[in-house]
Image (cartoon, rainbow, N blue to C red):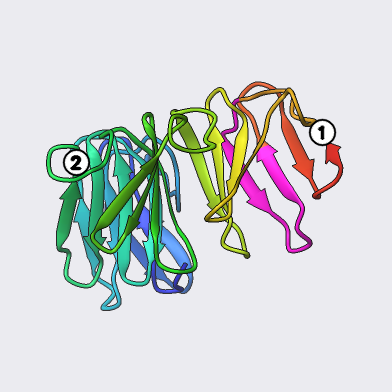
Amino acid sequence: LPKNLRLKSTDSGVNMLRIQNDHFRFANKTLFLFAFLVCINSLSVLGQNQEWLSWSNGNNISSLGIDGNTIWAGTTIGLVKFNRLNGEKEFFTTSNSLLPSNSINAVSIDNLGNIWVGSDKGLSKISGQTITTFNPSNSGLPSNYILVLYIDYENNVWIGTEDGGVSKYNGSEWVTYSTENSGLLSNAISSIARETNGTVWFGTPNAGIFSFNGSEWKS
């Protein structure tokens, strides 16, 4: 995340935020500051000129992905491409694109600049003007309902699903870990992170945290 980029939101819109001597001061004491969070209804970005650029449509923003000066926001009514330099917005929905769903749960950008979008109807890859969607019928994806995406250092895409465990896609091969073939005690994967040593951590909504170092699972 660029040092001059800040994100803020409240459950009732956006309040004034002033940065002074590295401290945050709020005009409204009820304001809560989050860098990334699920289920917010507005997005504000501090641009390079230190002015706030704001966007809100009254719908939940479920995920954010940052690619230079472009912010991709997953919402309940589609995907939004937001230019933090000039405030321009571009909307992607099922009616004007090949996205399979308007309910976007996860957004992540890989090392090649491809945009990966997880929804309740599969995994979509945006590469330039091309949108390709993966689902259980045409790929190794175990479930249509995607909760979280994570891109690791080797550009592997990790896909956490609601009921099928977690899959790793390297661009040609799929590997899926679930309660049937791993140390996972839940097939609902809601968060993913990776250490520099290669160990991958998985958070679940109902069974705690698990780690996998490539050969051994721990909980």
Q: Is residue 196 magenta?
A: yes
Residue 144 horizontal/vertical position (percent): 44, 29
Q: Seen from this angle, which residue lies furthest bottom?
A: 49
> Regarding mark 2 in the picture, which secondary structure is present there?
loop
> What residue lies at 67% left-to-right and 39% top-to-bottom?
202
Quarter of the figure with the C terminus: top right
> Which of pointers 2 and 1 lies earlier in the amino acid sequence?
2
Badge 2 local density, few (<14 within 10 Å), some, or many (20+)?
some
For label 1, the crowd category at 10 Å Cα-Cα, with few meaning under 14, some 14 to 19 and many 20 or more, is few
> Which residue is found at the position 26% from the left and 36% from the top?
12
Residue 184's place in the image compared with 171, above or below, is above
Element at label 1 = loop
**Magenta span of residues:** 188-202
Amino acid residing under circle 2: Thr
Image disc number at residue 33? none
Residue shown at the point (65%, 21%) measured from the top left: 206
Q: Quadrant of residue 71?
A: bottom left
Which residue is under mark 2?
Answer: 93
Q: Residue at x 30, y 32 (%)?
A: 103
Q: Is residue 110 found inside the magenta-colored segment of the image?
A: no
Mark 2 touching mark 1, by CB under 8 A? no
Residue indicated by mark 1: 219
The part of the image, by quadrant, that contains residue 19 is: bottom left
x, y percent for residue 15: 27, 49
- Regarding residue 135, the answer to whether it shows in the image is yes
Q: Can you say whether 88 is above or below 120 in the image?
A: below
Q: Nearer the viewer, mark 2 or mark 1?
A: 2
